[in-house]
Amino acid sequence: MPKKGKQAQVQVLLNWIGPFIGLILVLVIFASMPEIQDRFLRIANLKSVATQSVIVALGALGMTLIIISGGIDLSAASNIALASVTTAYAINAGVSLPLAILIGILTGGLVGLVNGFLITKLRLVPFIVTLGMLGIARGIAKWIAKNQKIDAPLTWINDLMSSTPRPPWLLLAPGVWVLIIFAILMAVVLRYTVFGRHVFAIGSNEATARLCGIRINRTKAAIYGIAGLFCGMSGVMQFSRLTVGDPTVAVGLELDIIAAVVIGGGSLSGGSGSILGSMIGVFIMAFLRNGSNMMGWPNYIQEIIIGGIIVIAVALDQIRHRKG
Amino acid sequence: MESQSSFTSLLLMKDISKSFGSTQALDRVTFDLQEGEVHALIGENGAGKSTLVKILSGALRQDAGDITFAGLPFSPSNPLDSRNTGISMIYQELNLAPHLTVEENIMLGKEIKSGPFLRKKEMRRAAQNALEMVNHSDIPLDTPIKELSVGIKQIVEIARALVDKAKILIMDEPTSSLSLEDSEILFKIIRDLKKQGVSIIYISHFLEEIKKVADRYTVLRDGKKIHTGTIQDESLENIIQLMVGQKLTKMFPRTQHEIKEVSLSLTGLRGRKMTADIDLHLHKGEILGFAGLVGAGRTDVLRTIFGLEPVLKGEIKVGYLSSLKSAPWSRIKQGMGYLSEDRQKEGLALNLSIADNIALSHFEPYRSIGFLNLKKYKKSIDNFLRTLNIKTPGSDQPVLCLSGGNQQKVALARLLHQQADILLLDEPTRGIDVLSKTQIYEWIGELASLGKSVIFVSAYLPELLGVCDNIAVFHRGKLISLRPVDHWDAHGIMTAATLGRTSKGKYSGTQNHA
């Protein structure tokens, strides 16, 4: 039976609104807790949550692209750590600060491109390639850093992640602005460019995409390369926050990034997902952590809640699709 | 001819009605089935055939009406209910576990146990018995299903239904993915089952085939029963008339077109699964049919031309240009388009929108300075759909929500939208209703009159004979003969396709244009 047009429109709206309701729910629940209600929704707290989210959120921008195309990137967090190390290394080597940032970002891009190359040329599944890269990138980071943290002098790079920015008229940390700009950019790319349509097409049905003349290998290399660049950016932010290049940072963070995309409506079988959804996913998790911390709940409670949220989000998504 | 009274009534579905929302899928339909009878259900896509058998197989529930089975009221609440009562459905898309063996598949869910342990010997005997009932005890019980051909798989599926002691088998388009040889085997099995008293409800778009296997037929149209009769008494034209409801002026509309210069030539081309080199020329304004059994290499030639399979040797010239890059993206730039025989798995991205599926190979008109003009995009796709007379709930809806016929039109519309000059169409009318078919024939004719070249692969001979200018017949990976259509008849094509030789004339494997 053909589905009616209106029904399907409601469906689209639901897909979009689902995660949004989730976010509101989290905010309302914590804001109504008597112990913290005076602090939780304060500007200062919101700002600090936003700043804390930058690292995961930048990673999620690239991951959204990858997941829509039907892939996965398990090496994201290792890549972030590697980029933070190369940034610190470059600063210590005496290069100018903008160049050091560029080196960090390009490191990430290079790792992404290698992922893309292995996936397309060797025809390996992304899960395996990036699982390997998870170890390789982390290992190289430790190698470069000689298995310890790389200290670097304090510079303006470290202000990128300060929630009390200088100049104050910025209101938000520069890192947050970077995130906002790139999130909008990526949302536009996905919706308004041919490349964006191709990403969805590959994720929805790769055979069809090939038949329609989409250059699968090129597009995939671009997808993983771009995602790598975002990991590089995220690595620079990581360095900015820690003021050291730490090869052991962000272990397991790839799962947070993937979870954010999935909570935001991304499907691991490809073909669906959105930047806005992923960003909402990031903030759902960030506010849960933040609220639980304020409540003084132990770490393990947070882990259980977030684990539960992931399962519930995906289950709701499935139910919605089955009805359709 | 057998008289009706020699049958004993087994099933009666009386005044069955069912609606989905505002759509009346079935409107007081009465259907009966005798013991040992093959009863064909005929109708266009959306006529209500599937809904009726789904009610019988327990997948749906009727809004009104009663079912009597073997003299008792019968109201299945789920498919298992029906199976246990002796009504089994053989699905269009095969329903077997590919990694399990033939025996394991036949006995799946019907394991014979004592306590927690399987009684292997008895299970093997039961599986063997089932295969004997379909006269195929030669199928090896220990072979994994994935190593068998589609035809054998279907036989295994029928055997599985028989283990359930099925009294009624429902077959929905059982031959749609079978070669002609396998179809013949299936028909023989059906006749054997009849003798054993099994009744069969047979749904198919192939009327010739129904004429061959069925005793009686029932025509449904728009959810209503139009007619039930004995198949021998009826001409195919009359049945088509009953299905369609309006006078079909011409099943194969011919558009005037003229064959001009060469647009595509293959010289000594060899690709995977081809057993001989191929030489042929395709011309502007030509509709060239590819006939042959499933697996005879028709599809492989198309896929090799389009760059989906590697060229092992030889040359493909587009116009006068040779040594072009052979990859789908490059072929599209050269003006080719390929319609896949499998629209679900390859032809369409089912959960993308109708608009995206049409424009996917050609976004250029809507792109300015790197960005898509979404307004212009939607507007021109909507216009495009209107001119092609494809009815949709909206171009932004997923292709998934369209019927089979309309999905196929969307897949073909993509090639029209990209303005391909050389259209490689692989089974463009498979599994779709008569009206959609006629529309697709019309499009193909118009394309030829515009000077485009079409290769039309089909297993359905009447349409090849009705639509094409020239027909090439393939047999076991080799081009047997290419002749103008009036040098062919169905018998000649079948001889070439099944035996690999031509029955008349001295036309050989290569070129012979009028």
Image (cartoon, coloured by chain):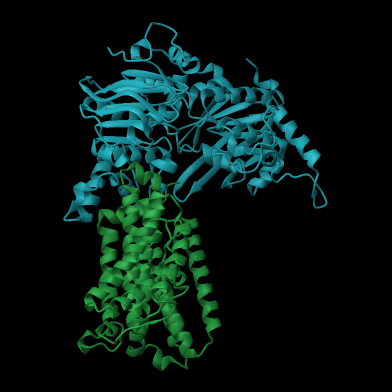
Can residue B239 be seen at all in this image of the molecule? Answer: yes
In the displayed orientation, state which residue is furthest to the top.
B505
Residue B114 in the image: above or below residue B294: below
Relative height, residue A312 to residue B473 (above, below): below
Q: Residue furthest toward the right?
A: B114
Tell me residue B510's x, y (percent): 34, 15
Q: Within the image, what quadrant is residue B155 found in?
A: top right
Question: Which quarter of the picture shows residue B422?
Answer: top left
- Is A225 on the left-hand or right-hand side of A321? left
Q: Residue at x 73, y 44 (%)?
A: B110
The residue sitting at 25% across, 34% down in the picture is B324
| Quarter of the rendering occupied by the N terminus of chain B | top right
Q: Position of residue A85 (x, y in %)?
A: 36, 75
Give the vertical position of B59 relative to B287 (above or below).
below
- Name above or below for residue B94 compared with residue B243: below
Q: Is residue B63 left or right of residue B390?
A: right
- Residue placed most toward the observer, A38 or B64: A38
Q: Nearer the viewer, residue B488 or A249?
A: A249
Please state the horizontal and vertical placement of residue B142, each as a whole percent of the image: 69, 37
Looking at the image, the residue that sits furthest to the left is: B369
Provide the letter of the chain coloured green.
A
- Between residue A196 and residue B18, name the one nearer to us: A196
Which chain is cyan in the picture?
Answer: B
**Quarter of the figure with the C terminus of chain B:** top left
